[in-house]
Amino acid sequence: MRLRMPFRRGKTEFPSHLWTQCPNCGEMLFNKQLVRNLSVCTKCEHHFKLGARERIALIVDSDSFTERDATLVSGDPLGFTDSKAYPARIIESQTKTGERDAVITGDASLGGVPITLAVMNFAFMGGSMGGVVGEKITRAAEHALSARRPLIIVSASGGARMQEGTIALMQLAKTVAALTRLGDAGLLFLSVLTDPTTGGVLASFASLGDIILAEPGALIGFSGARVTSETIGEKLPMGFQRAEFLLERGFVDQVVPRAQLRDRLAFFVAACRLPVAELRWGL
Amino acid sequence: MQAVTSDGGVIIDPAALSERRGSPWDAVRLARDQRRPHSIELIGSVFDRFQELHGDRGYRDDPAVVCGIGELEGRAVVIVAQQKGASTDENIERNFGMSYPEGYRKAIRMYRLAERFRLPLITLIDTPGAYPGPEAEERGQGEAIAKSIQVMSVLRTPIIAVVIGEGGSGGALALGVGDVVLMLENAVYSVITPEGCAAILFRSAAEAERAAMAMRPSAPDLLALGIVDGLVPEPAGGAHTDHIVMSASLKRALVAQVERLDRVPLADLLSARYDRFRAMGVWVDPGAGALAERSRPWWRRMLNRARL
């Protein structure tokens, strides 16, 4: 039995550690049930944001993931301060998420096929791409190239990390160049766009997948709503920049519900494998 | 492999500039000054026999991107430039230098052209950023920029990129993946406009000045950070005071760089371009260790101390 707090004003009808309200349909969802349903609303199929570790567990064969470059942490090249100094902001995000930066990379197998995987974490400073994210994604691409594995990148990011200024912008060029080498070597790159994928991440590697999949209802667009309204003084219409809209416009191959994501990825990875003879040529 | 040398009058030592600097916000205002020479004017005075080429072959011709073939001291080159207006009317025509996806697709067409005929590619960057409106989103702004960066990163011809005014975000980088990246002395180059940064971090575009201070987008800072290879000197008081001196200075720099890059074998050029961008980014690897612990409230710390 729960003890009632005598000084607390206003009762919360649903304690938040037990229940979550779906932002789309307003349904109150029992947390355990929500997790069991892969963080998808049981009523309206709204896809909640998924943490990077949960995403990895969702995609790869169980216990096959080994992390790479896990210890890289960001520097502070500009001495950037907004309301808080940048290093303090990083430490705050690290304690909040338990991760060192906004992407986790590593090797795994998917349906028995060895792959290299990079998964972005929106909870860490909006999944923004600074030096560490750029470096880890570049290393993942270079590793996939040397080990001749397919690469899967799951994006969830607000864009380039403003706290690293123009250096963050250069990460776009760096990651794209590494992925281009991967493609030139005939290796598969699957890009998965999740809620949200915007700004510099969409304007670089996320848009360059050989096959691009998106999660239902994910916000995908180049410019964020706040920048758009500041620049052109009007708001984007509802349902614009959503995964289904991009599918209709031809910028995404498929919109895949979360429950089917793993099988779909496994199918593409298995289908686009190089035959052994080709492999020998490539080496 | 190839350090930019100071021939062509390009400034490569950040220390040489220290006494001439204003605040970053002054730099942003100077870089946006409407009286500054814009791309068409610079192209007219730097290159001979410039022939403009139009259209992306898919949707329409974007007037914010001007490109074509011209001659630089007798050497044919491909020029891709972003055009801002010198007056409000012209700015509306040129969409304030903000390209739509078709502008980048037109640029990609030009890159391919330069590659096929092994013509050096020169890009002039002057934009607050890619256009962020609904039409641009609908036609794939992100994809167009990504593809443009990708094509440049493996283009089999020398590339010289020059930021001549305002280099804003991915919209500028889409023309900025060069073997050599130069900036005019009073130009700026940043990950987002100061207004955009302020709108996101400070929730108000009025804080743009503070954002500019924090992002340090001015040319001397970027030279010190190694993001650009050299600065093209401007006449005293800024490029807008003397357009003729400015274009002569730019021409000298471009001629020297084209001549230098022409001598580099293509394979070396491509691997140096890869390494140039590969080296950017600041990180540390302290090795495995515990993350900083969640800070506890003061009364919890007192309780723990009392227990000890």
Image (cartoon, rainbow, N blue to C red):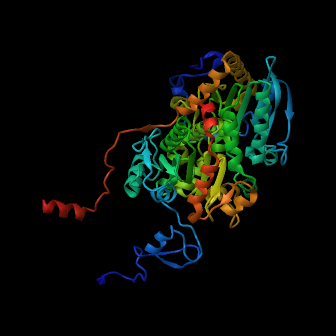
Residue B7 horizontal/vertical position (percent): 63, 15
| Residue B114, picture quadrant | top right
Tell me: B237 left or right of B110: left
Is the C terminus of chain B in the top left, top right, bottom left or bottom right quadrant?
Answer: bottom left
Q: Residue at x 32, y 57 (%)?
A: B294
In the image, B43 versus B274, the foreground residue is: B274
In the image, B231 versus B171, the foreground residue is: B171
Residue B174 horizontal/vertical position (percent): 68, 40
Regarding residue A273, the answer to whether it shows in the image is: yes
| Residue B150, picture quadrant | top right
In this view, which residue lies farthest toward the front?
A277
Q: Residue at x 38, y 50 (%)?
A: A91
In the image, B16 versus B292, the foreground residue is: B292
* Total tally of numbered discs in the picture: 0
Q: Is residue A190 above or below residue A233?
A: above
Tell me: A237 left or right of A82: right
Q: Residue at x 65, y 52 (%)?
A: A212
Q: Is residue A106 above or below residue A24?
A: above
Tell me: B21 left or right of B150: left
In the image, A2 versus B215, the foreground residue is: A2
Regarding residue B100, the answer to whether it shows in the image is: no
Is the N terminus of chain B in the top left, top right, bottom left or bottom right quadrant?
Answer: top right
Residue A32 horizontal/vertical position (percent): 43, 73
Q: Is residue A62 above or below residue B190?
A: below
Residue A124 horizontal/vertical position (percent): 46, 54
